[in-house]
Image (tube, rainbow, N blue to C red):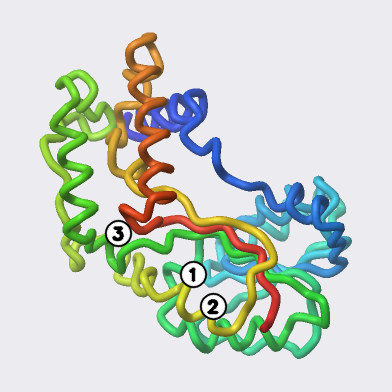
């Protein structure tokens, strides 16, 4: 099935180290000797992330907010079964009103690129953080609605054209990838998919200062294509090619050739 093909591709991507440059919040907090007590998890879904953070010693308690009732029901069940100090409530990030000075840590992981009212949410987060509190942002901050700029498309398609066909065959969608194109905004997975991703950093860095973190990823989200990771992983040649892509991906960011599309930042109100 397609789900099985996706799972196999994800496993191959992990094995080959696609996300090796990602930071881990528990490590960042430990290195900076920051020990938050009460945490807020935005767009928490079924609660896996806050359960993991508690298991790694981040915070004594968490509150999670999500728009999906079914996911919240699962999160409550899991937290209750494990005896964890986690509470949940329903809410839309576009309209949240958060209690003043309530949390030491707010976690926004993979959710800001779905938010239309970024300014409102950023202000609410700043309000709810206690003195010394921090915000963790881990998100896609590339072109809004995947309208890749000309420079990115030129570089990605040049690299793609260099690859033999076997390294361009997407086994997930069972197709040969010839070129990368701008996505059609009306045909994205959700009307709010990457709705203002290109504005996230401007909005948040206007209200917060950077404590730690980095920006990364310039081409690796597009080439090698999704669905090809097992092909790269299974041979020495494939693994060597992939290492070259990893090197180029960071080099393009470091030299300012392409704007990074991912960020991981620990922030505090300015």
Percent position (x, y) of residue 69?
Answer: 56, 68
- Residue 151 is at least partly visible in this image: yes
Tell me if label 1 and label 2 are in contact, CB under 8 Å: yes
Residue 174 falls in image quadrant:
top left
Q: Please, is residue 127 above or below residue 13 in the view? A: below
- Whether residues under marks 3 and 2 lie with C-beta atoms below 8 angstroms apart, the answer is no
Q: Is residue 243 above or below residue 196?
A: above
Q: Secondary structure at mark 3?
A: loop
**Given this view, does label 3 or label 2 mark the residue nearer the observer?**
2
- The residue indicated by pointer 1 is 112
Residue under the point 40% across and 42% down: 251
Q: Nearer the viewer, residue 237 or 115?
A: 237
Q: Which mark is residue 204?
A: 2
Question: Helix, strand or loop at disc 2?
Answer: helix
Side (left or right) of 99 relative to 262: right
Kindly identify the residue that appears in the image at 32 percent across and 29 percent down. Answer: 1
Horizontal side of 33 relative to 197 (left or right) equals: right
Query: Label 3 vs label 2: CA separation?
Result: 25 Å
Disc 3: which residue = 189
Query: Do the residues bearing badges 3 and 1 touch, measured as CB atoms within 8 Å?
Result: no
């Amino acid at each position: 099935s397609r789900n099985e093909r996706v799972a196999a591709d994800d496993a191959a991507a992990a094995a080959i180290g696609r996300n090796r440059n990602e930071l881990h919040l528990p490590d960042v907090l430990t290195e900076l000797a920051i020990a938050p007590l009460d945490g807020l998890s935005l767009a928490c879904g079924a609660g896996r992330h806050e359960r993991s953070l508690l298991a790694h010693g981040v915070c004594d308690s968490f509150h999670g907010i999500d728009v999906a009732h079914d996911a919240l029901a699962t999160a409550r069940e899991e937290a209750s079964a494990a005896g964890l100090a986690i509470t949940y409530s329903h809410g839309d990030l576009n309209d949240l009103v958060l209690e003043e000075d309530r949390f030491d840590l707010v976690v926004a992981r993979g959710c800001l690129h779905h938010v239309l009212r970024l300014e409102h949410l950023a202000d609410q987060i700043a309000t709810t953080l206690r003195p010394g509190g921090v915000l963790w942002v881990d998100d896609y901050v590339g072109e809004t609605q995947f309208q890749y700029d000309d420079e990115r498309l030129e570089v990605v398609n040049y690299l793609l054209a260099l690859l033999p066909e076997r390294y361009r065959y997407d086994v997930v969608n069972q197709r040969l990838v010839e070129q990368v194109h701008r996505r059609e905004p009306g045909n994205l997975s959700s009307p709010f998919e990457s709705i203002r991703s290109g504005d996230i950093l401007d909005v948040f860095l206007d209200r917060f200062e950077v404590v730690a973190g980095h920006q990364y990823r310039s081409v690796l989200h597009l080439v090698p294509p999704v669905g090809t990771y097992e092909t790269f992983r299974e041979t020495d040649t494939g693994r060597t090619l992939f290492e070259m892509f990893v090197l180029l991906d960071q080099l393009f960011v470091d030299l300012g050739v392409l704007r990074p599309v991912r960020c991981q930042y620990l922030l505090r109100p300015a």
